[in-house]
Amino acid sequence: MRGKAGKNCFRRRLAGVLQGGLLLLSLSIAGMGVAAPEWEFEGVERVVALGDIHGAAAEFESALRGAGLVDADLRWTGGKTHLVSVGDLLDRGARSRKVMDLMMRLQREAREAGGRVHVVPGNHEIMNITGDLRYVALGEYAAFAADESVDDRDRAFARWQSQRAEGEAAEREQFDAAFPPGYFAHRAAFAPDGEYGRWITSLPYFVRVNETLFLHGGLSERMASGSGTTLNEAMHAELQDYLAATEALQARGLLPRFADYGERFTHAEQAVAAGNAETAETGGTSEPLAAEDLAAFEAYVAMESALIFAPDGPLWYRGNAWCHPAWEAIRLQAALDNLGASRVVVGHTPTPTRRITTRLDGKVIMIDTGMLPYYEGRPAALEVSDAGLRVYYADENEWHPPIAESRSLGARPAGITDADIEQLLASAEIVDSEELGMGVTKPVRLTLKQGDITLRGVFKGEDTDTSGGSGTRRNYRLNLSDSYKNDVAAYRLDKFLGIDLVPVTVRREFEGREGSVQFWVENAISELERRQQNVPLYPACDLQEQYDLMQVFDVLIYNEDRNQSNLLFDRGNGSLRLIDHSRSFRTHRGRPAFYEKARLRLPPSIAERLRALDREVLHELVGDLLDRKQLRALLKRRDEILKDAEIVTGVQAR
């Protein structure tokens, strides 16, 4: 994030390269310093928080009533309670205007009663302000149709026609499809001086009530420095910078007016790359780009990394909800300490169970339960008080404690945990089987069914005979073995350590053979397939951190067979999964050859679990699967890892 000096430097540069009066006026409106709204509140006895509403007005109202905040006429009855909305009031749902109107009215009524209503913007509020309208429902535009005259639309159509490329059709039907009734009134309402634009741009981007922080997306390491006031001010300034620069560039014909947020940045990036700008006023002809205009485009493109727009900014960040808890705990704690909070409440990422869920030892509370029917969730309200946490679910009309996140690798039916998967793999009926025809272990994919739950797993029955012999001969056999037992042992060890990269694996018989069944990771692709098919990967979380855990795990179990075919990636979020550990747990000391020079890095929680892995614990964990020589060798490697590895205790540059 830019500091104040960098921010002011940017503004001077932009003002210097675009001397038009409109820009200077815009910058004077934005101001060189932006005062942050109030964001810290102490001594509050009761707080109620709501997740993403997305225009679900009826569901929103039912949650308010159930939490005792409004009466039958939707008038404030919450007294001194503080209500917090973590944003995303709009988009996708047709009644978002009604939601905003109610929220704005309740802000006034609650304050008069000694309470407060805090609204922190979500990414969808900012998208509407900046013109990123991908998720606006037709009903949302229709709610503004009465505010838009025929003359308004005729004037807009004339402007749109004038900016079409020469010879390009400009039919009224095409215009009306692109800009539905209510579109232009909607845009006016979300302008900085419009009713909703003015309200949204006045809101804090996060608030702290007592020791709980509330924001939309999450806390990344970018929130671990700078005061809360400074960070809020910076984000307000970034939005004003963007709006002022957009208006100025459009006024000079350097950006097309009928373009959305993404198209504007693409246009600017192309102009910077080519050194030429295609202006809207010249019908698409390309002219050499003046040095001052190129500098303006470069400054504009740089805005993509601003805290308010960036994937690791507090409106967009999903790491608190998605990323590996061992690493995420480090980032989170640094940000919480910086902002004087002990926990954070977030929306943005719907919980898999559609119930309010805690994560990272209760330091993250995820409250987006998919209130809008589009998400197939339920309206819910979180209550925070001296008595603790409880959750109201409107569809049940009951209060419950929040649930804690459980280990869950791989897609599965909602509410099914890894403990459930263990039971299903071990005992559910096998209704189909398919030989996969790959590898020396000849795996078989099974389809299992129990009640209305169906899932798939992979059976492996290979088990090299290592019986007989002693000393060197015994070690020799163990170190050449290929056994399903090692797959089961790898899963148990991974689970105990909290590495959480190995899918559920259990012992089970199939067609009279003892073996292992591993949960089939749906929607995954191996690294080998990915490279062969040139499939891009879009990881939602830091892959290197996951590789760091893989390296430590492979060294610990002396895995000699890590290769591109047993590295799996989720096609959706790019998360890493590890399979095929049948050639592990050798009796060697040291490391497998391909990890000999690897830099081992460990988060503190994994190091703590490694220290807890003594002889008794290890025997209890995998003693039924591994030989005593294998157990002794593993403990020696554990000691070497703890001696050699870097224990990462704070937010560090790699």
Image (tube, grey):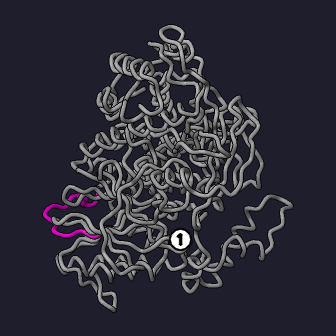
* Of residues 162 and 172, the one drawn nearer to the viewer in this rendering: 172
The residue sitting at 45% across, 66% down in the picture is 354
Quadrant that contains the N terminus: top left
Residues in magenta?
36-48
Q: Is residue 227 magenta?
A: no
Q: Main secondary structure of the magenta part?
A: loop
Residue 218 drawn above or below residue 604: below
SS of the residue under disc 1: loop
274 w.r.t. 410: above or below = above
Q: In the current view of this chain or complex, which residue is farthest to the left?
A: 43
Q: Please provide percent x and percent y for residue 383.
A: 27, 69
Q: Residue at image x 64%, y 49%?
A: 523
Mark 1 neighbour class, 10 Å CA radius: few under 14, some 14 to 19, many 20 or more: few
Residue 654 found in image quarter = top left
The total number of labels drawn is 1
Q: In this view, which residue lies farthest toward the top?
A: 472
What amino acid does circle 1 point to?
A: Glu
Q: Which residue is mark 1?
A: 376
Of 460 and 32, nearer the camera is 460
Front-most of residues 344 and 251: 344
Residue 206 seen: yes
